[in-house]
Amino acid sequence: MDLLKPNKEDLEHLAQLYVICNTPHFLYRKFRNDGITKNISDFPTEKIISALLKLGSEGVSNINELAYFYAVYISLTLKDDYENVRNFYNKEGSIGFEWFPEIKSIYLTSTIPSNSFTISFQDMNYAPTVEVIQFQNKNQYETLIELNISSK
Amino acid sequence: MSLIILTNNAIYEENKQSIHLQSSVGNNIPNYQTKELSQFEINTFDFYPKKYPFIQFKGQPTPIYNCHGFTFASKRTNIYTRDIRSILREDSYIQIARDNILPGDIVLYVANDGSGDIPHTGMLIQIDKTIKPEILYILGKWGKYKEVIHPALVCEYDNCNLEFWRNNHGFVKAE
């Protein structure tokens, strides 16, 4: 598969999915579960990002290309590479497509990175609270585990 | 590095516009019309009529309104999912139990993944009781595609729970 030259059948398939989406959340779910998006996500993150930049600089001129653009964008959400994907989503700014901001928002609010753990506790007002704590390396992870255990 | 999408035709965002739209209590309802897709492009799609040969596709494809705009804005514009619940509240809709539904009631397809998303809405137009279990026919709009008359459970919007609502201005008795 060539990221920059998808075949016609794939383009048409993605466009068929795209055209019946009423909401960005539905598009996000449909595309993430689609085989073509999954295939795109097999590429390294940096290759997907550079493909997005290249495709973006060229622009899209029809619905097939637009749907493919969404697929490449959403494929990043399947990567186990939270930091880089988050950084890219937060840096890119001037995207004109209607649902990119929502897709970014869904990803950032629903994804728990693999290098993290979740702590559930009650706050001072006894309200249930959940916090996601990320660690950058093994030492930090062990320290956080220690702190977590000693706080119980 | 920012990603700037320039197209040969137009920047899609520039094609967006909204209209004056309010709930019955006078609050503005955010909305947008888009001309993102040309008629020519959408007309090339014959995929869904082939996939669903027993479903009736109505009218022409248009991105001017989505299913929520069909259901709550008289086909004039697109409405966001996040505003559906407030529209139901401000327009005095009441939820109808499955046993009490009637043609004309609104149906919401609520995603069962806990996201609160409502990927599809439409209007119940017929209840076929000659078959058991009875078949509910929904008139709705599929995204930027066409209006569709489809059995409630035969459509692209899977993994959803159905909710039925009726507009009952000034009448608060639960049914």
Image: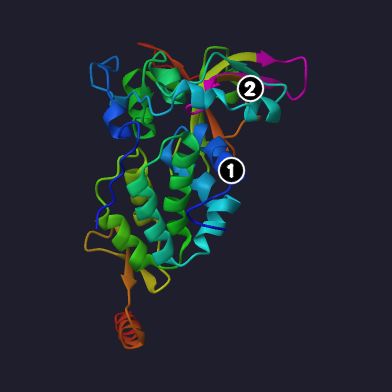
**In the image, A62: left or right of B45?**
left
Q: Label 2 is placed on what type of residue?
A: His
Q: Name the element at disc 1.
A: helix
Q: Around disc 2, counting alpha carbons within 10 Å, would you say few (fewer than 14), some (14 to 19), or many (20 or more)? A: many
- State whether residue B110 appears in this view: yes
**In the image, A96: left or right of A30?**
left
Q: Residue placed at 43% from the left, 60% from the top? A: A48
Marks 1/2: CA–CA distance: 29 Å
Quarter of the image where the C terminus of chain A is located: bottom left
Residue picked out by circle 2: B150
Q: What stretch is highlighted in magenta?
A: B127-146
**Are tags 1 and 2 found on a single chain?**
no
Q: Quick check: is B141 in the magenta stretch?
A: yes
Q: Residue placed at 25% from the left, 46% from the top? A: A94
Q: Residue placed at 44% from the left, 46% from the top? A: A70
Residue picked out by circle 1: A8
